[in-house]
Image: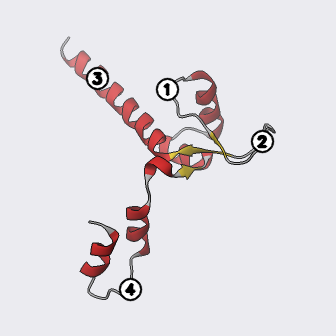
Amino acid sequence: MNAEANIAAKPNPTRLDLDEVRQELIDPECTIIRAKDVSAMTGLARSSVYKCINEDPTFPRPVPLSRSKHRSAPVGFVLAEVQAWIKARIAERNKRADNHEGL
C-alpha cells in the first residue's frame, strides 16, 4: 500500500501514523545508516563492525559522509547492503543446517 492510499484508508486522514508513512517513503537502496544502527541490526559490537570491514570482503563497505580524510571522519552504511549481508548470513546458516540433516 502506498503512502497516499494508506492516508486515504485511515478513518481520520488528518491524523497520520508518521511511522507508517516514513517506512513507506524510505528506500533501503539509498538510505544511509550509522555504525550504531549496523551494530543494532547485526548484533555486532561497534569494534566488531569495523573489524568486519577490514577482514570480511562480503561485509558492506562504509560510505564517507564528509570530504574529510581524517580517520575519525563520519561514515554510514547503505541500509539495503546491511540487510542483504544479514540475509546472506541467515541463508548460510540454513544451508549448513540442511547439510547436517542429510548426514
Q: CA distance from mark 3 to mark 2?
A: 38 Å
Q: CA distance from mark 4 to mark 2?
A: 42 Å
Mark 3 or mark 2: which comes first in sequence? Answer: 2
Q: Amino acid at mark 2?
A: Ser
Circle 3 or circle 1, nearest the eye: 1
Extreme right residue here? Answer: 70
Whether residues under marks 4 and 1 lie with C-beta atoms below 8 angstroms apart, the answer is: no
Mark 4 or mark 2: which comes first in sequence? Answer: 4
Mark 3 or mark 4: which comes first in sequence? Answer: 4
Q: Residue at x 60, y 22 (%)?
A: 55
Q: Residue at x 58, y 28 (%)?
A: 52
**Mark 4 closeness class: few <14, some 14–19, many ≥20 residues within 10 Å:** few
For numbered disc 1, what is the local secondary structure?
loop
Q: Which percent across, then down, holds residue 98? A: 23, 22
Q: Which mark is residue 95?
A: 3
Mark 3 or mark 1: which comes first in sequence? Answer: 1
Q: Which percent across, then down, holds residue 17? A: 39, 76
Q: CA distance from mark 3 to mark 4?
A: 46 Å
Is 92 displayed left or right of 79 in the figure? left
Q: Which residue is mark 4?
A: 15
Q: Which percent across, then down, holds residue 67? A: 75, 45
Q: Residue at x 52, y 30 (%)?
A: 59
Vertical order, 13 against 24 (above or below): below
Circle 3 or circle 2, nearest the eye: 2
Whether residues under marks 1 and 2 lie with C-beta atoms below 8 angstroms apart, the answer is: no
For numbered disc 4, what is the local secondary structure?
loop
For numbered disc 2, what is the local secondary structure?
loop
Q: Amino acid at mark 1?
A: Thr
Q: Which residue is mark 1?
A: 58
**Mark 2 closeness class: few <14, some 14–19, many ≥20 residues within 10 Å:** few
Vertical order, 62 against 40 (above or below): above
